[in-house]
Amino acid sequence: MTTAELNGKLRESGNKSAARKIRREEFLPGVLYGQKDNVSLKVNQKDFGIIMEKYGHNVLIGLSLEGDSVPKRQVILKDFQSHPLQKDWLHVDFLEIDMNKKTRVSVPVKLLGHSPGEKLGGLINHAAKELEVECLPGDIPDTIEVNMADVQLGDVVHVRDLSVSDKVEILDDPGITVVSVYVEKVKEEAPAEGEEAAEGEEAEAAPAEAEEKSTASK
């Protein structure tokens, strides 16, 4: 698992007005859910944004907080809030983890390369973009990869087909579809109104003609 370092400070828990003031100072308010205690904190918004942009949400962070009783805590991202219209972060929650105990996290699924089926008109359906895994924090994979060069037209890759380290257990149902390559069915065009009427007349005329022939033969 990718690791990063982040510094911050303890803060007093407050209301929305206090949180806005922290953000104006270019800090990001947050909460650390620790092994033995929960603490309110603030971290540099720019530094946090760089980590997220570089490593993504699935990163192990060595968090050092000024004024904390613990020099450094190993944490992962628990939750966050971001601005709906801007790139700004609004709030972040960290979860302290024990490096010697297994933990459960969601890991993104990454598609590598292109399927040969795409050249034949196939479309890619990336159905499962994240999977839940259980393992020691140091063994958490950055991504679970699928080599699309091996996925032919009409193929379906399920969870059970994925290859991960024997130190990592995927908790999702083995039968879940991760990605498939398919050809979109072309819908038959409905006949125009005039064509439908003509077909109806022909269908009605057929029995009538058959009846006339039958009468003539008698």
Image (cartoon, helix red, strand yellow):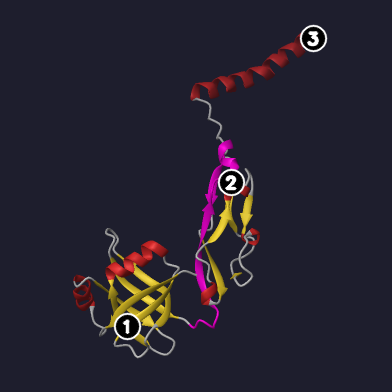
Quarter of the view holding residue 46: bottom left
| Amino acid marked by disc 2 | Val
- Tell me if mark 2 has few (under 14), some (14-19) or many (20+) residues whose alpha carbon lies within 10 angstroms of its own: many
Residue 89: where, in percent of width, then height? 30, 67
| 2 or 1: tag closer to the N-terminus | 1
In this view, the mark in front (3 or 1)? 1
Q: Earlier in the sequence, mark 3 or mark 1?
A: 1
Q: Earlier in the sequence, mark 3 or mark 2?
A: 2
Q: Which residue is mark 3?
A: 217
Mark number, residue 213:
none
- Can you identify the residue that label 1 sits on? 65
Where is residue 88 drawn, in percent x and y? 27, 64
Disc 3, disc 1: CB below 8 Å?
A: no
The crowd level at tag 3 (other Cα within 10 Å; few <14, some 14-19, many 20+) is few
Left/right of residue 17 with respect to residue 136 in the rendered view: left
Image quadrant holding the C terminus, namely top right
Q: The magenta stretch spans which residues? A: 98-126
The amino acid sitting under disc 1 is: Leu
